[in-house]
Amino acid sequence: MSYDPQNIFARILRGEIPCKKAYEDAHVLAFHDIHPQAPTHVLVIPKGAYVSFDDFAAKGSDEEIAAFVRATGKIAREAGVAETGYRLLANIGPDSHQEVPHFHVHIVGGRSLGPLLVKS
Ligand code: 5GP
C-alpha cells in the first residue's frame, strides 16, 4: 500500500486540521483521539510518511524508531497512566480495521480495560 498524503493524520501534521496536542518533538507528534475510548486515549504518530507499523518497522530509521518508542513511554508517564497501567494498540491493515493509513499507536488507559479483543 502506498502512502496517501491526503490522509487525515498527514493533514494534522501539516497543520491543515487542528488537534489537541499532547506531545511533539523532531520525529513524533501525539494528540488526543477525537473519539476517546477511555479517560486517556492518545494517538502517537511518527512525522515520517509510514502507512502502518509494518511499514515503519521495515523502513523507519533507527533514530525515528528510538524516538517513537521513547516518546510513547514518556507520553504515557506524563498522562499519569504508567502506574495504573495502559494498553498500546496498533491496527495494521484490513483485518485490524485500520481506519487511518498513517502509522499510529493508541495509548489507552485511565480505567480497567477488560479483555484484549471483543469476540466476533
Ligand atoms: P485506527 O482504527 O486507524 O487504529 O484508529 C484511528 C483513530 O483515529 C480512531 O480512534 C479515530 O477516532 C481517530 N481519528 C480519526 N480522525 C481523527 C481526527 O481528525 N482527529 C483525531 N484527533 N482523531 C481522529
Image (tube, grey):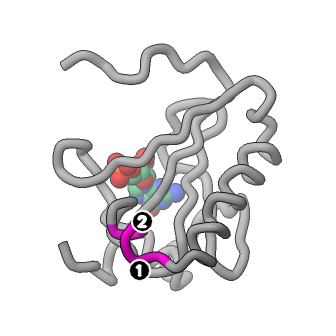
Label 2, ligand 1: CB separation under 8 Å: no
Vertical placement of 109 versus 103: above or below?
Answer: above
Can you tell me whether the CB of the residue at mark 1 lies under 8 Å from the nearest atom of ligand 1? no
Q: Which residue is mark 2?
A: 57
Picture quarter containing residue 51?
Answer: bottom left
- Against 54, residue 10 (above or below) is below
Relative to residue 62, is residue 107 depicted above or below?
above
Secondary structure at numbered mark 1:
loop
Mark 1, other Cα within 10 Å: few <14 / some 14–19 / many ≥20:
some
* Residue at 63% in and 78% down: 63
Give the mark nearer the N terminus: 2 vs 1.
1
The magenta segment = 55-60
What is the CA distance from the residue labelled 2 to the residue labelled 1? 12 Å
Looking at the rendering, which quadrant does residue 5 occupy? bottom left
Kindly identify which residue carries mark 1. Answer: 49
Q: Residue at x 71, y 71 (%)?
A: 24
Q: Nearer the viewer, residue 9 or 74?
A: 74
Question: Do the numbered discs 2 and 1 sit on residues whose CB atoms are within 8 Å?
Answer: no
Expressed as whole percent of the image width and height from the top left, the position of residue 83 reads: 80, 28
Query: In the structure shown, which secondary structural element does the residue marked by tag 2 occupy?
Result: helix
Is residue 31 a member of the stretch shown in magenta?
no
